[in-house]
Every structure is written in C-alpha cells, then in structure tokens.
Image (cartoon, grey):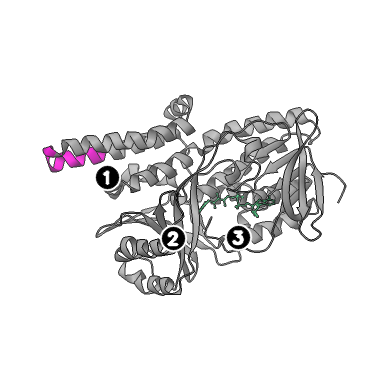
Amino acid sequence: MKAGFDICIIGAGMAGATIAAYLAPQGVRIALIDQCFKEKKRIVGELLQPGAVTSLEEMQLGHLLEGFDAQPVDGYALLHENQKITIPYPENHIGVGLHNGLFLQNIRASALQNNTVNQIEGKALQLLENEQQEIIGVSYREEHTSEIKAIHAPLTITSDGFFSNFRESLSNNKKSVTSYFIGVVLKDCDMPFPSHGHVFLSGPTPFICYPISSNEVRLLVDFPGGQLPRKSLLQKHLDTNVTPFIPAEMLKSYQQAIHVGGFKLMPNHYMAAKPKIRKGAVMLGDALNMRHPLTGGGLTAVFSDIHILSTHLLAMPDFSNKDLIQKKIEAYYKDRQRANANLNILANALYGVMSNNLLKAAVFNYLKNGGENAQESISILAGLNRNSWALIKQFFFVAMYGAYDLMLENVNNLPKAIKVLVDALAIISPLARNELSVVAVVHGYFKK
Ligand SMILES: Cc1cc2nc3c(=O)[nH]c(=O)nc-3n(C[C@H](O)[C@H](O)[C@H](O)COP(=O)(O)OP(=O)(O)OC[C@H]3O[C@@H](n4cnc5c(N)ncnc54)[C@H](O)[C@@H]3O)c2cc1C
C-alpha cells in the first residue's frame, strides 16, 4: 500500500469497522486502529432494527449479515398482564437478531480484505495537533512491541465507543447512566411469538428478548438507577421482578440459564450529540451519541451516520483540502442530528414510560387498537420513519388516549388522567429540547 492515509479510524468496533468496509473499496486509504481484533462476546448490538438493515443494504453491505446464523425478526410482541399483542414491521422490511461478535468479525474481515486498509493493533493514546490546533492524527501504543508510534492523516475519525478517550477534545457533552442491562442467553427457548422482539411490561421494570441464533434467545433485564448492582441485589431483582413474569413456555430455558449464571452487565447511557467542531477530526458512534438500548436503536443511528458522513466525504475529489473536509464534517453533524432525533427521543421516552404504570398501560392499550397509529409507531421504532412531527404526535396521542380511557372508566379518575398528561410532558420535554429544533418539527408537519 502507498505511504500516507486519507483517514485514520480510532476503534474498529461497529462504527469504525463498518465505515472502513464502506469507504475502502472506493479507494479511500485508511489506517484502522483497535486495541483488540479478536472476537468478543458482548450483549450489545444484537438486534438490528429494519432501519439499520436498510442502511446496510443502501451501502451494499447487506451481505455482511449472512453466514453466521443471524435470524430474521418480523415485528414486535408486547406482553402486559395476561394480554399479548403483536405488531408487524412495515411491509417488505425485516429486522435481524444476531451475535454481535460474529457480525463484527464479518465486518472487520470485509474491511481488511481491501489493500487500501492498514490494520493497526494498539491502543490509541492522544490526538496529535499542529500549531494551529488542527488535529493531524493520533499516537498509539503498538500491541505487540509496546512502542509508542504515530499515524498522520488529514481526517481522524474517533469511533472508540462509549468509554471514548477523545470525547473531551471533540464533544461538549458528558454521558449519564440511566440504568443497567443484565444479559442472559436462553438456550433452546420457545418464545411466545417466534421471530419477534418481545417487550415484557408486567413487572415493575421492563425486560426484552429476541432471537440471536437458531437456538438462542437474548434476554435483557433492566436494573434501574446509575449504580452497578451487587450480586445479591441482582439475584433478588431477578427473583422478585423477573421470574414471576416469565411466560410458561420460556421458563425451563430461563431457569437453566439462571442456574448456570455468569450474566453480563452493561451500563445504559444517554448522551445527546453536542460536537465541538475541530479541523481534522470527527466523532462517530457511541463516542458521539448514545440512547437507552430498550428500542435497539443504536446501530440504526450508527449505520445511518456512516452513510451520511461517507456521502459527504465521497463528494470531495480527494482528502487534500482541509477546509473542504471541515465543511463536510459540519454538514454531517447537521444532517445526522435531524436523522437521529426520533431514535434518540423514542428510546429514552419509552424507557420513561416503562417506569410509569399509567403510561405503560396507555401505550399497551393504544397499540392494541392496531390501525394506522400502531403502524406509524412501529415504523418510528423500526428506524424507518424519521419524521419528528410523527413522533411528537404519536407520543401525545398515547398520553391523551390514556387520559381519555381513565375518564371513560370513571370520572373520579380525573386526577389520574391529568397526571398521565403531566408525566408525558415531563418525559418528552427535556429530550425534545436536547434533540429537536422547532424547525425540524414544523418541517416534519408539512412533509407528513
Ligand atoms: C446493553 C446494550 C445493548 C444494546 N443493544 C443494542 C441492540 O440490540 N441494537 C442496536 O442497534 N444497538 C444496541 N446497543 C447500542 C450499540 O451496541 C452501540 O450503539 C454500538 O455498538 C456502537 O458502536 P461503536 O463502534 O460506537 O462502539 P463499539 O462497538 O463499542 O466499538 C468501539 C471500539 O473501539 C475500540 N477502542 C476503544 N478505545 C480504544 C483505544 N483507545 N484505542 C484503540 N481502540 C479502542 C474498542 O476495542 C472497540 O472495538 C446496545 C447498547 C447496550 C449498552
């Protein structure tokens, strides 16, 4: 490969490896750094919403979902007390359940087969700057020699995940932990609705499950709060808040998995994107923006960001003009904000709804009615409908429906009905302030 790189990518995770796999065949010269290229067993990024699948297909990367027993997902099932409903994804769209580690190795192999990609195993240490405070590359400790080395490139992409070391230089925001997910694999498990993502609403905290191979189901149990649970607390949480609500057909696999133990725990972050524009660098993936994983929206955002950023970069004749690169970075940040607002708001708003019994019942009853409103709601969840007006409208329809239902039941429920509306407003307002502009909502209204 010729000396010199166009792009240096820090982190060959979902974001870094995928953008390398997309840009490398188009002749972009890439240095791809990661501290470890071995397969990892993680509980993240195992359900791709149809929006993520569509973005991959649009980038001609759909084949990366093949060859490792990934499973089609046709829609969602909601279980509340003794009622069950299913809502299919919009026609001609599917989601995919998979082992994240196997998928990532497929993406990495696809990137590394290009002779325009240089694989570097090492820990990125510090962004390098010139006298004008422009970023010109990164220093790293090479894994095998422990030597400190440097890579220079006109553009550095920091995609080093949620513990990003470079956020301080490139972002004006800090992450916060909303809750933890406890990950359990259920072997040979019959779900109430095969090929569906399941949301269990009956317990005090939500849990979800979906297939990740032909004989495995991933169960993710929420543990609320910002404190990592101790082992004894975790067991108590499962015994009290999960086990009694596991459907009969799943119980045997669930009890076997609980008996074996060894669960994985992951923090669930929220962080709106507030990038600092610096010449020579751009953030991608969880390093830039995170939302609660309840809705599985992370990879939809990551892949759509990759598509947006790549389209801007590929419109340049080459990577020689730093001013032009900066303009492209600014355009990417602006476009991605609008593209991802729905995913970010919905994820944390739904998480808020799950901790509120009245709103939880309102969502279930609203979706149970089916029809156009349920279809529009699922298309937002699927990452296919990015119209902010549609999201705000559906959210308030749910709250109003909940309030109306309570009043219909008994006029003495008026205080409860008011509480539903007030709580809905309290959940959505801070998220909308972080993620949305009035212009985007008005624009959405006229484009509906
Ligand atoms: C519990 C949980 C469940 C989730 N489930 C889903 C889901 O079902 N569907 C979905 O769409 N999204 C899900 N997400 C979100 C999704 O997994 C993330 O949005 C996605 O993995 C982000 O990709 P990334 O490339 O930014 O980070 P990562 O995939 O974490 O990659 C970061 C990479 O950077 C490397 N790295 C870090 N620091 C350095 C350094 N200093 N030097 C070199 N390399 C470095 C790491 O080794 C790693 O390979 C979930 C998230 C959580 C927390």
| Kind of residue sitting beneath label 2 | Arg
Query: Residue 55 at what x, y percent from top left?
Result: 57, 47
Disc 1 is placed on an element classified as helix
Callout 3, which amino acid?
A: Phe
Residue 410 part of the magenta-drawn span: yes
- Position of 78 with respect to 446 (left or right) is left
**Mark 2 = which residue?**
230
Q: Residues within 10 Å of mark 2 (few under 14, many from 20)?
A: few
Dot 2 falls on a residue whose secondary structure is loop
Residue 342, position in %: x, y?
46, 39
Instruction: Name the residue type under label 1.
Output: Ala
**Most frequent secondary structure within the magenta stretch:** helix
Residue toward you, 89 or 383: 383
Q: Which residues are magenta?
A: 400-412
Q: x%, y% of residue 145?
A: 81, 59
Label 2 or label 3, whichever lies nearer to me, is 2
Position of 363 with respect to 34 (left or right) is: left
Instruction: Find disc 3 in the rendering and name its residue.
Output: 103
Label whose residue precedes the other's in the sequence (2 or 3): 3
Q: Is residue 198 visible?
A: no
Residue bearing the label numbered 1: 362
Give the residue displayed 33% in from the left and 47% down from the top.
355
